[in-house]
Image (cartoon, rainbow, N blue to C red):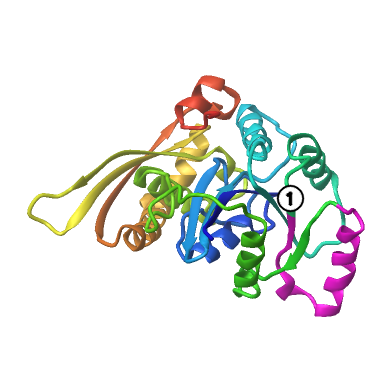
Amino acid sequence: MHKSGFVSVVGRPNVGKSTLLNRILKEKLSITSNKAQTTRNKITMIHTDDRGQIIFLDTPGIQSPKNKLGDYMLKTSVSSMEGVDVILMVVDMSDYLGPKDQMILDAMEKEGRDIPAILVINKVDVAPRDEVLPIIAKFAAMNRFEDIVPVSALNDENVDHLVDVIFEHLPEGPQYFPEDMITDQPEKFIVAELIREKGLFYLRDEVPHGLAVSVDSMKEVEGKDHMDIQATIYVERDSHKGIIIGKNGQMLKRIGTEARKEIEAFLGEHVNLRLWVKVSKNWREKDEKVKAFGYKAD
């Protein structure tokens, strides 16, 4: 029996969806940070083993939109629940069911009423085990989830069991992708995301949400054992450009150095990374700019 299917992964910002999927695939395909709006696109991530194939759809954290980019992200998350085989809702160890959680539950009721749902309680490593049971009981009382699985994505605790549970709810089906394929995203997209991740990590809170990265070129250097990559970091304000470049270019150099390490690990070869910084004023407010930076509905 070969099982396969599509699994939409939804949740509030910062509950660890991307960390969980990176752990399942044993590859860093989705960037992580402690800032909201880290994941902006729907990213297809593919797990294949002897039992079959799971096609995960990693989505932006659901929240109330504040601009055109936020509108796109919310539509992306909600639409990802349509027509899938399983919905994976990820929460953390908080026992507070807030408005963003309710938005997800409402969307599940509207878009995925008849779709099996699994609740994943992530970050169980941050609290005593006896605090997990009341949270499980709270969500179990909703009678919406076929299974509830506590995990620690950070510590790889119970993650393999979660994969087992997902396979239990998948139908028999074909292998949609080659077994060695782990994402349908082009290398340029992953490279741009790895650069943006370093900006999220190193920059002050007012800057990262307005970051966008465009990979302008990726070329194998003839006669040399490395790839030449040129990319542009876009910001919304002139003052932010100065912050990213930093005194004597030190911040930009730090972002580039750390991003290069991640990119080399991803591509499996040496990389010469060159970065530029440009201003695209208030791009998140402009529909045409949001689309130009690659945030388009399917």
Residue 274 in view:
yes
Residue 246 in view:
no
* Front residue of 220 and 199: 220
Residue visible at 58% across and 56% down in the picture: 18
Rendered image quadrant of residue 179: bottom left
Q: Residue furthest left?
A: 223
Left or right: 278 in relation to 282: left
Q: Residue furthest front?
A: 1
The residue to which callout 1 is attached is 116
Viewport quadrant of the N terminus:
bottom right
Question: Residue 155 placed where, x, y %?
Answer: 61, 75
Question: Residue 245 placed where, x, y %?
Answer: 41, 46
Rendered image quadrant of residue 69: top right
144 over 71 or under it: above or below: below
139 over 212 or under it: above or below: below
Q: Which residues are magenta?
A: 118-143
Residue visible at 46% across and 41% down in the picture: 242
136 over 243 or under it: above or below: below
Residue 107 among those drawn in magenta: no
* Amino acid type, label 1: Pro
Residue visible at 50% across and 47% down in the picture: 44
* Front residue of 164 and 195: 164
- At label 1, counting other C-alpha atoms closer than 10 Å, the crowd grade (few under 14, some 14-19, many 20 or more) is many
Q: Secondary structure at mark 1?
A: loop
Left or right: 20 in relation to 131: left
Question: Residue 112 placed where, x, y %?
Answer: 74, 40
* Front residue of 55 and 37: 55
Rendered image quadrant of residue 80: top right
Left or right: 110 in relation to 38: right
